[in-house]
């Protein structure tokens, strides 16, 4: 995603979930390390971690930052501990906690392996009677559960 695409994405989520326009700038910031995004009180812009843009949780990260944004501009409780913030976050289905790469790494995956030794990782359990290995079409067996940061980093979906 480019910064322009990110801008459009944030504007769309803002309109869809908050019913209000996002009229400031959203950009990627490579210097964000473990944080998913941040709201800049001084200029009302949003910054996001480019390393998180492909995670399924990215929409939740954007909604979380938009909660800070809209509540701050409306003069309401925009901090994590504020009742306004908690209520709005729940309403739009944003990430409850300040998103970090660390808690993404703690997400659990089901691990499957075929007879040829190909590994497959899925967030949800799959029925091994119905699905075969995508690479060689051999049957899969369930190995167990692993955390995202224990996976080699290539094949998990
Ligand atoms: Zn936050
Ligand atoms: Zn295979």
Image (spheres, grey):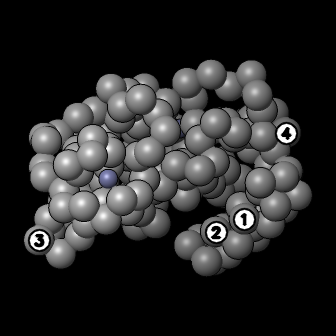
Local SS, label 3:
loop
Q: Are marks 1 and 3 in contact (CB under 8 Å)?
A: no
Sequence-first disc among 2 and 3: 2
How many residues crowd around disc 4 within 10 Å: few (fewer than 14), some, or many (20 or more)? few
Q: Nearer the viewer, mark 2 or mark 3?
A: 3
Whichever of labels 1 and 4 marks the residue nearer the N terminus, that label is 1
Mark 2, residue position = 13
Front disc: 2 or 4 = 2
Categorize mark 2 by other alpha carbons within 10 Å: few (<14), some (14-19), many (20+). some
Disc 2 and disc 1: Cα gap in Å? Answer: 6 Å
User: Tag 1, which secondary structure?
Assistant: helix
Q: Is residue 73 left or right of residue 154?
A: right
Pointer 2 with pointer 4, Cβ within 8 A: no
Badge 2 or badge 4: first in the primary sequence: 2
- Position above or below: 151 against 63: above
Q: Look at the numbered disc 4 and give the secondary structure of its residue.
A: loop
Front of the two marks 2 and 1: 1
Report the disc number at residue 43: 4
Q: CA distance from mark 1 to mark 3?
A: 39 Å
- Disc 1 residue lies near ligand 1 with CB under 8 A: no
């Amino acid at each position: 995603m480019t910064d322009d695409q990110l801008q459009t994405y944030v504007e769309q989520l803002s309109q869809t979930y908050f019913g209000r326009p996002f009229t400031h700038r959203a950009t990627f910031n490579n210097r964000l390390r473990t944080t998913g995004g941040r709201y800049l009180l001084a200029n009302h812009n949003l910054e996001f971690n480019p390393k998180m843009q492909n995670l399924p949780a990215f929409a939740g990260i954007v909604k979380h930052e938009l909660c800070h944004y809209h509540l701050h501009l409306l003069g309401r409780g925009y901090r994590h501990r504020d009742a306004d913030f908690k209520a709005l976050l729940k309403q739009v289905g944003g990430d409850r906690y300040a998103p970090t790469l660390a808690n993404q790494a703690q997400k659990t995956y089901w691990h499957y392996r075929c007879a040829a030794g190909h590994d497959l990782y899925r967030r949800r359990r799959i029925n091994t009677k119905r699905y075969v290995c995508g690479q060689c079409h051999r049957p899969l067996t369930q190995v167990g559960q692993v955390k995202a940061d224990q996976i080699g980093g290539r094949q998990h979906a």
